[in-house]
């Protein structure tokens, strides 16, 4: 009867509804232990490893459906003002060591930090505020920059990005992001006339503060005045004047550090058109992306003595992203699409 159960969507001895509820609670609550307690209170005895296995396989099935591009989004980005962003977080991944176990029979392991990459696609209204009528698209992966940009391309195609009114790519100044943005724009065939690239304004201001900090002979108020003045210039779109001012400071024992900060502004000068972006009523910061990192990664996957197996972390990134984006129904369709196709 096993093949017949698969056709009905029964995996891991769970109906589709039960699998969805277990996976959603595992993503929503702070731990698998807490999920287990919730079900135990309902009279359903589920162990931590069982919950982990069900949630992981739920996400794995959705990823398979993604690869064959099943169930496109119901919405379209046609004539919308779209903001695309990506960034990285930090979690600890557990890997077992080779060799003998401990005296208690436990495996020895290492816990290295890894950077999960997260993407976000959302729309804004004519005032530049997030459009609440369009649920954002959020997803993450541990497989590196190329993988997250592959996911980004997949979602933008599914949402018919070519019909968007304006498209803004905004992120911090990380090189791994911007060297792939150009390739993505080219691969999607987007016209350059309505595509904008922008370095997050508030990250740029942080670099201004770093420049001022190199001037050890300045007082605190002098540093503040310098940052405030050049922050205003940056906001008005005069990145060239900011670069000239920083170059004048490249002397003395701290010239190497100031020069490195100057290179940051030179490298991203074309992405510092803040006045133009403000005129188009588009956001000049990536605060939504920073919030996504906090809600998806930090509040669930990062903590003291919290270590993840890589496969479980990859699954949780997907589950948590779809849950926080308000797109759990789409994840359900993806997870059970193979059963539906077989049934048809």
Image: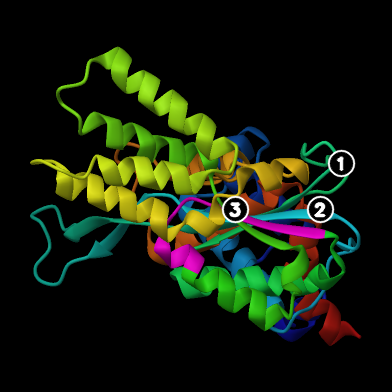
Viewer-proximal residue, 155 or 43?
A: 155
Q: How many marks?
A: 3
User: Residue drawn at (73%, 81%), measured in percent from left and top?
Assistant: 189
* Gap in angstroms between the C-alphas marked 2 and 3: 13 Å
Q: Is residue 145 above or below residue 206?
A: below
- Residue tagged by mark 3? 170
At mark 1, the secondary structure is loop
User: Residue drawn at (39%, 27%), measured in percent from left and top?
Assistant: 227
- Residue tagged by mark 1? 126
**Label 1 crowd (10 A; few <14 / some 14-19 / many >=20):** few
Magenta region = 166-178
Say whether residue 323 is left or right of residue 48.
right
Q: Earlier in the sequence, mark 2 or mark 1?
A: 2
Say whether residue 214 is left or right of residue 201.
left
x, y percentage for residue 47?
50, 50
Viewer-proximal residue, 77 or 252?
A: 252
State the quadrant of the N terminus: bottom right
Q: Is residue 142 above or below residue 4?
A: above
- Residue tagged by mark 2? 81
Are circles 2 and 1 on residues that touch, CB within 8 Å? yes
x, y percentage for residue 56?
55, 63
x, y percentage for residue 194?
77, 64
* Gap in angstroms between the C-alphas marked 2 and 1: 8 Å
State the quadrant of the C terminus: bottom right
């Amino acid at each position: 009867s096993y093949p017949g159960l698969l056709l009905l969507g029964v995996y891991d001895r769970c109906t589709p509804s039960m699998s969805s509820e277990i996976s959603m609670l595992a993503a929503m609550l702070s731990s698998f232990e807490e999920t287990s307690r919730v079900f135990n209170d309902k009279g359903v005895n589920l162990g931590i490893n069982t919950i982990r296995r069900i949630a992981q396989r739920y996400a794995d099935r959705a990823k398979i459906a993604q690869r064959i591009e099943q169930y496109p989004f119901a919405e379209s980005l046609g004539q919308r003002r779209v903001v695309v962003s990506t960034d990285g977080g930090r979690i600890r991944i557990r890997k077992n060591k080779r060799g003998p176990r401990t005296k208690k029979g436990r495996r020895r392991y290492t816990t290295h930090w890894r950077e999960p990459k997260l993407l976000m696609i959302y729309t804004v209204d004519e005032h530049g505020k997030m459009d609440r009528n369009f649920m954002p698209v959020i997803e993450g992966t541990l497989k590196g920059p190329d993988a997250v940009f592959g996911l980004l391309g997949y979602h933008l195609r599914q949402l018919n990005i070519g019909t968007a009114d304006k498209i803004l790519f905004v992120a911090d100044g990380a090189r791994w992001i911007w060297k792939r943005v150009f390739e993505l724009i080219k691969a999607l065939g987007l016209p350059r006339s309505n595509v904008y690239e922008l370095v997050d304004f508030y990250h740029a201001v942080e670099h201004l503060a770093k420049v001022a900090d190199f001037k050890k002979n300045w007082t605190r108020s002098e540093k503040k005045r310098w940052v405030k003045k050049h922050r205003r210039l940056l906001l008005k779109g005069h990145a060239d004047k900011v670069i000239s001012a920083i170059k004048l400071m490249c002397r003395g024992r701290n010239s190497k550090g100031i020069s490195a900060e100057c290179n940051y502004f030179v490298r991203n000068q074309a992405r510092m058109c803040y006045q133009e972006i403000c005129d188009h009523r588009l956001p000049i910061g990536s605060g939504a992306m920073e919030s996504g990192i906090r809600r998806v990664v930090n509040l669930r996957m990062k903590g003291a003595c919290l270590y993840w197996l890589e496969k479980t972390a990859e699954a949780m990134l997907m589950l948590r992203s779809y849950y926080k984006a308000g797109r759990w129904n789409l994840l359900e369709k993806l997870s059970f699409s193979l059963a539906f196709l077989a049934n048809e």
